[in-house]
Amino acid sequence: MRSVIDIPDLSLDELKELIDVAMDIIANPQKYAEACHGKKLATLFFEPSTRTRMSFEAAMYELGGNVISVTGAGTSSAAKGESMADTAKTVSCYADIIAVRHPKEGSAYVMAQNATIPVINGGDGGHSHPTQTLADLLTIYREKGRFEGLTIGLCGDLKFGRTVHSLIQAMSRYNGNKFVLISPEELKVPSYVKKDVLQQRGIPYEQTTDLEGAMPQLDILYMTRVQRERFFNEEDYLRLKDSYILNMEKLKNAKPDLAILHPLPRVNEISVAVDNDPRACYFKQVLNGKYMRMALILKLLKEAQNEH
């Protein structure tokens, strides 16, 4: 059974196909209004989420399907010690497709191995968040019209930021891209991401602690929050949480067509004054996420149907 746990699970042709479907959904929403009639999406969210869960649910409703959900480990049998494998087998009896978020890396993979229906990873710990990357890709495509020859700045928590790891994986598959990794020393991109993705593919990247210095060359700036929930101690979090705050002053040397992305939620790493700048794309990103999740749900359900 086909699932999507990590962004490399989708080929470049499939990414293009998902973007084409999402663009068609945007242009012709009525055509898709009953596409999932009679189908059920189970959302299993064992970690807090507003956007991702609502986005999956809105996506399914707009396709004419239904949603059943579990939110928080405390409200499910996981609180009684049920394994992910057993949860997967059980939920497969009730639904047609699963979207799961879990604080533990690898949990979505375990679920996919044991489910008899498609599983979509809605974020597993600090590992990966493929549907956020799909939202990012559609945003980049709609803003830039291409995925090649771009200088992409990633700023903030690059160590624990699963959205960052997934986006690096995705954008490093296209030609001519360069990465600028902007973070405090303690929150640098993990060495395995640099080694297995960037160095292995010979992709140019630079690491810096200086956001303003990097700004003039960027086509895309991907801001992230410093995540309290990934820190072992409060002092480190408090020391680093305000390392990079994007404001209008820091944008004065930026390109006029810079696209500013952020996976949200933001805490204070982008000043609200930036929201009115035409370069701010993070709320467009939210909407694009819904369209890409609609496209992915359609694709996986269709493939599952063809298997039977």
Image (cartoon, rainbow, N blue to C red):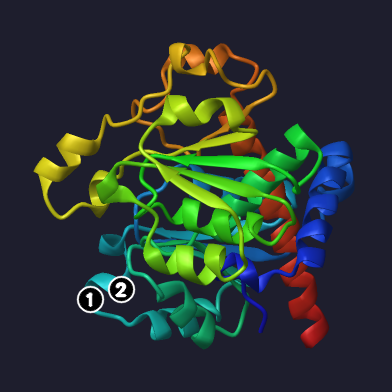
Does residue 238 appear to the left or right of 19 in the view shown? left
Q: Could you tell me residue 187's position as x and y percent?
A: 30, 49
Residues under numbered marks 2 and 1 in contact, where contact means CB atoms less than 8 Å apart? yes
Mark 2 is surrounded, within 10 Å at the Cα level, by few (under 14), some (14 to 19) or many (20 or more) other residues, namely some
Residue drawn at point x = 71 percent, y = 45 percent: 138
Q: Position of residue 27 (x, y in %)?
A: 88, 37
Secondary structure state at the residue bearing disc 2? helix
Instruction: Report the residue at 28% width, 47% height from top.
Output: 185
Residue at mark 2 to residue at mark 1: CA–CA distance:
5 Å
Q: Residues within 10 Å of mark 1 (few under 14, many from 20)?
A: few
Q: Amino acid under label 1?
A: Lys
**Residue occupied by mark 2:** 77
Amino acid type indicated by mark 2: Ser
Helix, strand or loop for disc 1 = helix
Quadrant assignment, res 253: top right
Residue at 37 percent of width and 70 percent of height: 105
* 64 shown above or below 276: below
Question: Percent x, y for residue 133?
Answer: 59, 52
Q: Circle 1 is placed at which residue position? A: 80
